[in-house]
Amino acid sequence: MKSLTRGDEMSKRTESLVRCVNGNVSDASSATPNSKVRKHTISVFVGDESGMINRIAGVFARRGYNIQSLAVGLNRDKALFTIVVSGTERVLQQVIEQLQKLVNVLKVEDISSEPQVERELMLVKVNANPESRAEIMWLVNTFRARVVDISEHALTIEVTGDPGKMIAVERNLRKFQIKEIVRTGKIALRREKMGATAPFWRFSAASYPDLKEKAPVSVLRGSKKGALVPPIEKTAGGDVYPVEPTSDLMVHHVLDAHWGLLADEDTSGLRSHTLSLLVNDVPGVLNLVTGVFARRGYNIQSLAVGHAETEGISRITTVVPATDESVSKLVQQLYKLVDVHEVRDLTYLPFAERELMLIKIAVNAAARRDVLDIASVFRAKTVDVSDHTITLQLTGDLDKMVALQRLLEPYGICEVARTGRVALARESGVDSNYLRGYSFPLSS
């Protein structure tokens, strides 16, 4: 009897163990979609005001999220953040809800699961000895990159593409010893579906001249309930770029050609300073850095965050208007942060600077040829086409971005995603900004 009892007990224990295992397996399988950690691309559309970057970075820092890349672009007087983080869908949804509670946040979207055009810009400075230069140039041509600076022992290369392409370029150039890398972080725009109706016709009189209906005041899709987005007449200035005051003489309010660029002869001593920071790649470091700027009242004109040449290190490139004296004090405050390794002011050094922009234009069959002709002049690439839109990719300096926007405004600009400025000091010592003031050949 005892043996039978023990056998029954053993069988019961085995059955209960099997049930527990099956239950855990079923629970794990059912929780997999929500508990799986993967990269998420979050698009945040905000009104451009002072301190907005610090508040958004603080939402991620308080929850222990490490922002892998962040790019900030401007659309009129509003900023578009593209943030890449890793996490589960359930927790990311909670973060999105917290972002939507912030003042002046108009729209927050997770576009990871949707078809999208994603691009990133990277500047790479690599050692280039005479015996290895030919192979490096072959790689440049293979990846459709560009050389933006040449010196006796180094090349600075500009590469644009998706994150996978960036990784492939970096791996192939490692054997030549990479000196510096600066990346903008990823920007993304949703791909338009072929055959869909044109939701952007109201933006464009030139593209859709047959539509005589007056465009209604629109509400952003996916924005807060009842959050209208009327044109703002005047703003004090924001985190991303100084906001252009309205003028009755201008029909289309787009970026001015010299936004964010202060004249050297400014009597107040203010000018745009380009700072390059090397920081630890840990959660909360961006919040700490931007907090230093926010507490001292600095308006960040441009910000780009991406991985540096060393594993575990990120590079932050930012542009702030300030005097030389105030910037030197700012640098001293930044060095007090534990996670900051290096701060360089590139303002008075010859440096190569680049920005990346994705711009979606409303077009029909009649206007498509004109838009493509304008794009070819600026060497812009077509990265997406639908029945009613064209998405272009452009790299260059601020003036080039704004010039293209001005020409495309009559056709109707639907969406703009821009990175901040990235910069590397030129090994050649040639200051291209200085040379622009001269006509060639120079008289002796």
Image (cartoon, rainbow, N blue to C red):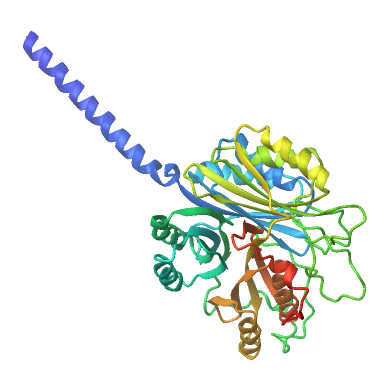
Residue 251 in the image: above or below residue 277 = below
> Where is residue 39 drawn, in percent x and y?
48, 50
Asked where in the image residue 129 lies, by quadrant, the reply is bottom left
Judge whether residue 294 can be spotted in this image: no
How many numbered marks have been drawn onto this rendered protein structure?
0
Asked where in the image residue 29 lies, by quadrant, the reply is top left
Name the residue located 66 percent from the left edge and 62 percent from the top edge: 221
> Where is residue 406 drawn, in percent x and y?
75, 76
The outermost residue toward the top is: 2
Q: Nearer the viewer, residue 99 or 348?
A: 348
Q: Image check: 161 left or right of 55? A: left
Looking at the rendered image, the quarter that the C terminus falls into is: bottom right
Q: Nearer the viewer, residue 194 or 355?
A: 355
Judge whether residue 315 can be spotted in this image: yes
Q: Nearer the viewer, residue 94 or 370?
A: 370
> Where is residue 90 drawn, in percent x and y?
51, 43
Q: Image check: 210 left or right of 389? A: right
Looking at the rendered image, the quarter that the N terminus falls into is: top left
Residue 158 in the image: above or below residue 382 = above
Q: Nearer the viewer, residue 90 or 423?
A: 423
Name the residue located 63 percent from the left edge and 85 percent from the top edge: 364
Name the residue located 72 percent from the left edge and 61 percent from the top edge: 74
> Where is residue 13 drawn, in percent x and y?
20, 21
